[in-house]
């Protein structure tokens, strides 16, 4: 028994009288989609499976709380997908985003295995919804679970309970004890009490490190402290860093993350989808110097919303301001906290703390640069553009001249990070010397850098988590069963 | 912010009721998220609106069938700092609908308290009317309360058909005036043109939605009266109560037809339509209201609004009393206590009829109107604004 420094009280039983002593076949670290899938997958082969969820019960589930759909290969149209989506098409979509697949072999495996994921999810209690107005544009490629990510988690946790899988909430893994090429014990803090858990195999499905500002600052400098994190505060990469300490080989780019423009007044953590700002294509966006810096009308919004997080992250003070007028207020959802408004541009500048002269000059330059005679059409690339600006606005350019004027401050909202640990095709974690741990597996965002390093494909994070959760759980159980 | 601001005016309008400001805040979060659109009609209706005003919120609140699936699916539900709790806030808004559509003399006098103390109001009214009914019996001598009179088992041995009909029509007329006024006010507020209230297609679909309680399915699993426990129980109990109530109504109409058209006088045979439908209906009322009372006592409090639950309880107690006294009237009709039981039952029926516009009795009317409005919007496939 290893004694941790500063320890006070130890714990051997959970509140539900779950015995934590004795050896567990598979211990899964994490409480989101990949972790739960791994636990259920392992439980099909072995008896004693334990899930260590760091968050308390009320906010269990990591970033999965904020997910909504999964992108899988399917041959047929059915009640939940409006058309077929074949292997080749998903593969092409994957190749066309960011820098493409990081490890082609593992990415191919992910796409191939995705086809059986929806059926597996249904068998494990997940309910679906047909594509409705809010989901229609993704209805062919993506399958939407009824009620979103938290409902998915609730279904999975109920299935876990029915499968007699133990879940320990408020349980943070603080250390691994290694023997040879295996991890044999986990040092866990359970609601402030210490516990040593014996494991025959370990699945790390504990997400990325986006909620760890110090870590982000290593690659982004102090500007990282101005980012807002869209998921829970618990995704601080503790387990990832323990794996690096054990010599795990990194996968994915250090600065790889997904970020969107969100309301600057959003909470620092866990604001999720509701805080995003959809005003950008109908606005001009200024930095803190009152200058435009990126084409607001570059492409249809669903294709561009994910570039704006990084756009703003790269501006001074990591802040930007969308400004629009009364003509377009009904074209997009009002921001959840409401914008500031004024009958004058000077008033707007005042409300967001920009220099009024500079702001008025930028708006007037923009207004006069709009090429007249092109009709505004919010439903398509309308070609209403400016000429002579740097940068231009290529679509939906209308003069900002009809008070009241509106403005909102935006910051980068980080969804997830890509850098994690390298794995083999059995989800085994690799070491820097090229060998693998015998009994340590990884699934979900902690290994997503093996598949993608940059860019974003809606619903594919859930696909990675489901495919690799299933593999990691199964392989961990197989290792235990010999 | 400018006061004349047409779009975001609501948020800063200090004269608006804090409840509606809070409901708008929460529903704006819902509209930015839209994960719940598969659960019921409320969320697609919300998505048809970009900017919410008071009438939108009233409509959405009455469209909500309180299945609570959205609360347990919500990552922004308490303890999240956004504190999104649609079932609770919409129940609170519905309560203002029931209040604001109630007659002026109720509305003016701390109506919440009147409504919440309904069991007291209910039972004192029952008591009062029962005394009056018994006084009517005085023609037969007060002792008739505990004696059988000829013809045995017929209410008319105690109180004349004309008296029953006259009192019932007067009270119905009184209630109908207030319910109609409420319907018109509600419709003007949430929809506008009264002509829209007379389109057969949306009505047919609304009646189907109402009759099947489609929006109580919570998407698939039923109502969540507790976290992690969805079931069809609440929907089935609602069927028992509403169809039970309907069968009691059928029994009354059937009895009237038998008497007036076929000159068959009570007591009706055990295998007659009035007796069978009355017995089944009464049974449904009793079982359904008992079941719903039990469900209310085990529900998770966070998902609802306290005063609304008080209104629900009062309403269920009234329905239970209606069912129990109705069945008792049938069972006791050839015994010596029939006169007494009949007096109580008549008093309960008349009390329910009289208090309907003031209490939760009218909830199904506003739900139905919301369903009509919803089906109008679907039929028009137009954004509301």
Image: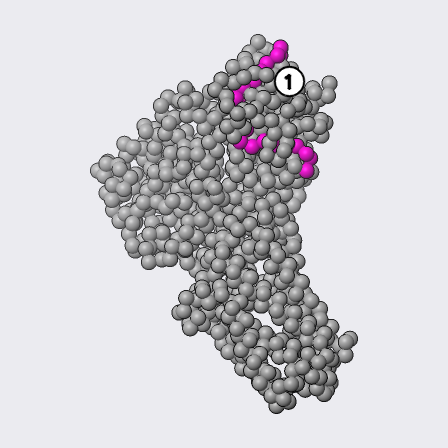
Q: Is residue A140 visible?
A: no
Q: Is residue B287 visible?
A: yes
Residue bounds of the magenta highlight: A162-181
Residue A170 magenta-highlighted: yes
Residue drawn at x 23%, y 43% as measured from the top left: A346
* Vertical relation: B337 (above or below) A209: below
Residue drawn at x 73%, y 21% as measured from the top left: A481
* Vertical relation: B18 (above or below) A121: below
Residue A467 % position (x, y):
63, 29
Q: Nearer the viewer, residue A418 or B308?
A: B308
* Vertical relation: B86 (above or below) B58: above
Q: Quadrant of residue A310?
A: top left
Residue B297 % position (x, y):
58, 55
What residue would you read off at disc 1? A439
> SS at mark 1?
strand
Q: Quadrant of residue A79?
A: top right
Residue drawn at x 41%, y 55% as measured from the top left: B19
């Amino acid at each position: 028994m290893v004694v941790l420094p500063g320890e006070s009280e130890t714990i051997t039983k959970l509140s539900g009288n779950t015995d934590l002593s004795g050896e567990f076949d598979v211990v899964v670290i994490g409480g989101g989609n990949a972790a739960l899938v791994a636990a259920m997958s392992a439980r099909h082969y072995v008896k004693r499976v334990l899930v260590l969820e760091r968050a308390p019960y009320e906010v269990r589930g990591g970033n999965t709380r904020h997910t909504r759909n999964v992108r899988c290969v399917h041959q047929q149209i059915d009640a939940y997908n409006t058309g077929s989506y074949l292997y080749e098409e998903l593969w092409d979509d994957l190749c066309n985003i960011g820098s493409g697949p990081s490890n082609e072999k593992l990415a191919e495996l992910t796409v191939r295995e995705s086809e059986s994921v929806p059926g597996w999810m249904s068998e494990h209690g997940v309910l679906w919804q047909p594509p409705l107005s809010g989901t229609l544009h993704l209805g062919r490629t993506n399958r939407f679970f009824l009620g979103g990510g938290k409902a998915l988690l609730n279904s999975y946790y109920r299935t876990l309970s029915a499968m007699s899988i133990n879940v320990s909430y408020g349980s943070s893994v603080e250390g691994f004890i290694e023997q040879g090429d295996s991890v044999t014990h986990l040092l866990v803090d359970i609601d402030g009490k210490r516990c040593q858990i014996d494991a025959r195999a370990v699945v790390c499905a504990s997400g990325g490190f986006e909620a760890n500002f110090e870590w982000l600052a290593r690659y982004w400098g102090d500007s990282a402290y101005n980012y807002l994190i869209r998921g829970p505060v618990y995704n601080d990469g503790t387990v990832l860093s323990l794996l690096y300490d054990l010599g795990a080989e990194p996968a994915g780019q250090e600065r790889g993350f997904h970020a969107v423009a969100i309301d600057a007044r959003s909470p620092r953590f866990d604001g999720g989808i509701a805080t995003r700002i959809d005003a950008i294509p109908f606005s001009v966006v200024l930095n803190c110097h009152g200058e435009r810096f990126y084409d607001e009308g570059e492409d249809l919004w669903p294709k561009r919303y994910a570039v704006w997080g990084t756009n703003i992250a790269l501006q001074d003070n990591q802040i930007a301001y969308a400004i629009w007028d009364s003509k377009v207020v009904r074209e997009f959802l009002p921001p959840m906290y409401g914008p500031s408004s004024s009958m004058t541009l000077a008033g707007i500048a005042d409300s967001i703390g920009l220099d009024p002269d500079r702001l008025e000059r930028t708006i007037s330059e923009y207004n006069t640069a709009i090429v007249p005679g092109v009709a505004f059409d919010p439903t398509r690339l309308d070609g209403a553009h400016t000429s002579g600006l740097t940068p231009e606005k290529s679509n939906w350019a209308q003069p900002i001249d009809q008070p009241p004027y509106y403005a909102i401050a935006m910051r980068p909202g980080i969804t997830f990070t890509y850098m994690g640990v390298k794995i083999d095709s059995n989800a085994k974690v690799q070491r820097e010397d090229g060998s693998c741990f015998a009994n340590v597996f990884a699934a979900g965002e902690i290994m997503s850098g093996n598949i993608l390093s940059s860019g974003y494909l809606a619903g594919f994070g859930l696909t990675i988590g489901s495919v690799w959760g299933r593999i990691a759980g199964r392989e961990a159980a197989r290792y235990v069963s010999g | 912010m400018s006061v004349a601001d047409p779009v975001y005016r609501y948020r800063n309008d200090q004269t608006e009721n804090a409840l509606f400001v809070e409901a708008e805040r929460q529903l704006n979060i819902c509209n930015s998220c839209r994960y719940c659109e598969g659960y019921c009609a409320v969320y697609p209706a919300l998505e048809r609106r970009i900017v919410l005003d008071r009438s939108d919120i009233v409509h959405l609140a009455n469209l909500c069938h309180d299945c609570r699936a959205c609360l347990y699916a919500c990552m922004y539900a308490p303890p999240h700092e956004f504190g999104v709790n649609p079932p609770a806030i919409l129940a609170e808004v519905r309560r203002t609908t029931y209040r604001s559509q109630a007659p002026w003399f109720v509305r003016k006098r701390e109506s919440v308290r009147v409504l919440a103390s309904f069991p007291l109001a209910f039972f004192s009214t029952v008591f009062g009317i029962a005394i009056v009914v018994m006084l009517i019996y005085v023609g037969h001598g007060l002792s008739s309360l505990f004696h059988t009179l000829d013809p045995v088992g017929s209410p008319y041995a105690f109180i004349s058909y004309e008296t029953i009909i006259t009192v019932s029509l007067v009270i119905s007329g009184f209630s109908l005036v207030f319910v109609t006024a409420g319907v018109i006010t509600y419709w003007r507020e949430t929809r506008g043109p009264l002509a829209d209230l007379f389109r057969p297609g949306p009505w047919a679909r609304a009646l189907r939605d109402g009759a099947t309680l489609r929006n109580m399915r919570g998407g698939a699993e039923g109502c969540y009266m507790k976290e992690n426990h969805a079931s069809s129980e609440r929907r089935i109990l609602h069927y028992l109560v509403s169809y039970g109530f309907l069968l009691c109504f059928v029994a009354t109409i059937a009895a009237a037809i038998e008497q007036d058209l076929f000159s068959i006088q009570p007591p009706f045979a055990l295998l007659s339509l009035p007796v069978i439908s009355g017995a089944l209906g009464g049974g449904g009322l009793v079982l359904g209201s008992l079941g719903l009372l039990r469900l209310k006592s085990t529900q998770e409090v966070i998902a609802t609004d306290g005063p609304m639950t008080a209104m629900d309880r009062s309403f269920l107690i009234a329905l239970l009393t209606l069912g129990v006294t109705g069945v008792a009237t049938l069972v006791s009709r050839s015994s010596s206590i029939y006169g007494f039981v009949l007096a109580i039952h008549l008093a309960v029926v008349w009390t329910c009829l009289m208090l309907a516009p003031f209490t939760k009795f009218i909830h199904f009317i506003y739900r139905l109107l919301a369903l009509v409005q919803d089906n109008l919007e679907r039929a028009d496939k137009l954004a509301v604004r």
